[in-house]
Amino acid sequence: MSTLSLKHLVAKLSRKATLQTVLIVPFVLQVFAAVGIVGYLSFRNSQRAVNDLADQLMGEVSNRIEQNLRTYLQTPHQINQSKLDAVKLGFVNMKDLSAWEKYLWRQVQLYPYINFTSIANQDGEYRTGEKMSNGTLLINASGPSTNFDFYSYNTNDTGDRTTVAASVKNFDIRQHPSYAYAALAIKPTWSSVYISFLEPTLILSALQPVYNSQKQLEGVLIAALRLDSIGQFLNSLKIGKSGQTFIIEKNGTLLATSTAEKPFRTQNGKKELFKVTESSDAVTQTTAKYLENHFQNLHQITKAQQLNFEINGKQQFLKVLPFQDGKSLDWLIVVVVPEADFMQQIHAGNRTTVLLCLAALGMATVLGILTSRWIIQPLIKLKNAAIALSEGQFDQTVKLDRSDELGVLAAAFNSMAA
C-alpha cells in the first residue's frame, strides 16, 4: 500500500470517526499494548529464569551423584590396598587362607556399602567375609579344601563358622571372569557388573592382582560393592517434584535408578541384566531411547550434555554426565526433570498477569468512556446551540458550570448569541 493511499484511508476514517471514538480507542489501545508487552516480556523472562533454574538444579544433582559415586567407588580399592599391605608386610600369606577368615569377617563390618571382601590364590583357594543386607555375617569358602564346591557359612559372635547357609556345586574362582580379568589387568581394576549369588542386588568388584618378587601372580584380592546402595542414594534425592535419575553403562545396561525398578530381571529362573531401553518405567525407557536416537552411539558422549525433549507432548529437561574413574569404569549419569515441575508457579503467575491485564484494560476502557463524556457532552451542547443559532433561534444559551477552556468557550458563545 502506497503512502498516499494510506493517508487517504486515514483521512477517510477520520471523517467517519466520532470525537468520542478518537478519544477512547487510542487510549485503550495504548493501555492494551503496554500491558500486553509487559506481560509477554514477563513470561519470556520467567521462561529464561526457569531454564536457568533447571540447569542449576540438574547440574547440582548430577555433580552430587558424581561426588558420591567417587566416594562409593574409592572404598573397595582402599580395602584391597589394606589387604595388599598386610601381604607385603608379612602379616598373612597367599598360601594358607584359613588365617584370613576372621580378618575378612571383621573387615566387611567396617564398611556399610560393601557386600563382601575376599582373597583367592593360584591354587583355587577362596575365602570371603560377607555381610548381607539384613546384617547377617557370613564366611564363604571354596577350593581344593571344599572339593571346589562353594559354601557359605553362618558365623557366631567371634567369627567362627557355624552352620551352612548356602552352597553352590563346582565353583572354581580361577574360572570366574573377575579372577581372569584381574590377572590380565596387572593393575587395580574393576570386574564387570554381575548379580549376587545370595541376594537380589548387582555387584561390582574391585580387583587387585598380587605378584611376588619374581613378578609371578600369587592371587587376586576382591572387594565387592553393592550397587543397590547407589540405587538407594539416588532414590533419596529430591529432583524437582517428579524428576528421576539413573546410571547406565555406555553399552546401555541399567545399573541403578531412583525409581523402584530393579536393575535385573528373572528369566526362566535365572537373573539377568537388561538394557535401559527395555525398562518398565515409561520415563526411563523414553529417555534412554531419545539418547540412543540422538547420539546413535552412547560412547560418543564424552562431556556433559544439556538437552530438551518431549514425552507425550510434555517438555522435559535432560542432563547427561559421563563418569569415569580411571580404573576402567565408563558410565553415564542421567537426570531428567519435567518442565512442568518448574512451570507450575510460572503458569499461575501468568494467569494472574492475564487477569490483571484484563482488569487494567477494563478500567482503562471505563475511565476512557467517563473522560470522553466529560469532554464531549459540553461540546455537544455547544454544537446544538450553534446549530440552533444558525437557524435563527437567538435565545439559545449554553449553561456550563465550569472554569476550564470549555467553560470559557461556553461564556464566549453566550456573549456572541446575545
Image (cartoon, grey):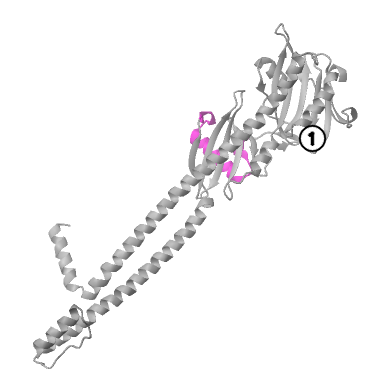
- Residue 244 pos. (x, y %): 59, 44
What is the residue that sits farthest to the top in this orientation? Answer: 214
Left of 135 or right of it: where is 343? Answer: left
What is the residue that sits farthest to the front in this orientation? Answer: 403
Left of 17 or right of it: where is 354? Answer: right
Q: Characterize the local packing of mark 1: few (<14), some (14-19) or many (20 or more) Cα atoms within 10 angstroms.
A: some
Confirm whether the magenta stretch covers residue 283.
yes
352 shown above or below 331: below
Q: Residue at x 58, y 46 (%)?
A: 239
Q: Give the magenta range.
A: 275-302
Q: Residue at x 16, y 61 (%)?
A: 6
Q: Circle 1 sits in a helix, a strand or a loop, which is it?
A: loop
Residue tagged 1 = 132
Front one among 134 and 294: 134
Front one among 87 and 14: 87
- Residue 171 pos. (x, y %): 80, 22
339 shown above or below 154: below
Quadrant occupied by the C terminus: bottom left
